[in-house]
Image: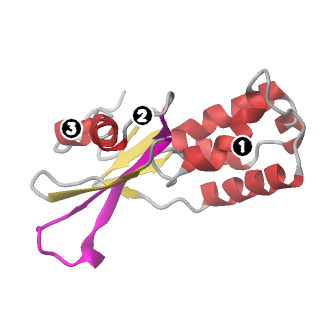
Amino acid sequence: MKISSPIIEFLGAVIGPSTIKLQAHIITKVANFKDQELITTKGLRSWLGLLNYCRSYIPNLGRLLGPLYSKTSPNGEKKMNSHDWALIHKIKKMITDLPDLAIPPEKCYIILETDGCMEGWGGICKWKSQKYDPKSEEKICAYASDKYSPIQSTCMNLCINCGLDWTVFATCVSTYLFF
């Protein structure tokens, strides 16, 4: 146990002074996952499970992974095609170039950019020091997206889902110890 440490490793994240980044061992595991293992349903599920740690760092990850998730269902097509392999290699490349996310300070201007349709929703949580600071000063603190099952009305559910996913930033922004 570390006491009074400026950098904390917690639930797959390295939380440091004003930043959150994915732990290096998770990046390595995802990037170096053997293609041979991805052919099996068990291996693909394992790899997709590891990618859940990356959801806050990669925009629209759920939508990107949709074709691969369908291969894990009982009725889905199991055989990998060239598009699936291209997607897997694209994600493995993306995972090695992840940007650090910026933890918002206690008094800042929070921006929630959201979008949705009847099938799903997505959003970005950003912040800047002052309300009228230029757009170039905005820093990203989280991405979130998901599908609706069953299809739902967009506006209310979009607000509810984005708000629930980022409640943690509203309550833990000054201490950033528990995410």
Estimate how packed mark 2 is, as few (under 14), some (14 to 19) or many (20 or more) residues with alpha carbons within 10 Å: some
Disc 3 on helix, strand or loop?
A: helix
Name the image quarter holding the C terminus.
top left
Where is residue 138 shown, x and y percent of the image? Answer: 27, 68
Question: Circle 2 sits in a helix, a strand or a loop, which is it?
Answer: loop
Question: In percent of the image, x 72 and y 34: which residue is there?
Answer: 70
Q: Which residues are magenta?
A: 119-148
Spatial separation of the CA atoms under disc 1 and disc 2? 22 Å
Sort mark 1 into few (<14), some (14-19) or many (20+) by Cα contacts within 10 Å: some
Say whether residue 29 is visible: no
Q: Amino acid at mark 3?
A: Cys
Residue 52 relative to residue 71: left or right: left
Marked residue nearer the N-terminal end (3 or 2): 2
**Secondary structure at numbered mark 1:** helix
Q: Say if the magenta span includes residue 109.
A: no
Q: Is residue 121 left or right of residue 162?
A: right
Residue where numbered disc 1 is placed: 67
Residue type highlighted by circle 2:
Gln
On residue 172, the disc is: 3
Earlier-in-chain disc, 1 versus 3: 1
Q: Which residue is mark 2?
A: 152
Secondary structure of the magenta portion, mostly? strand
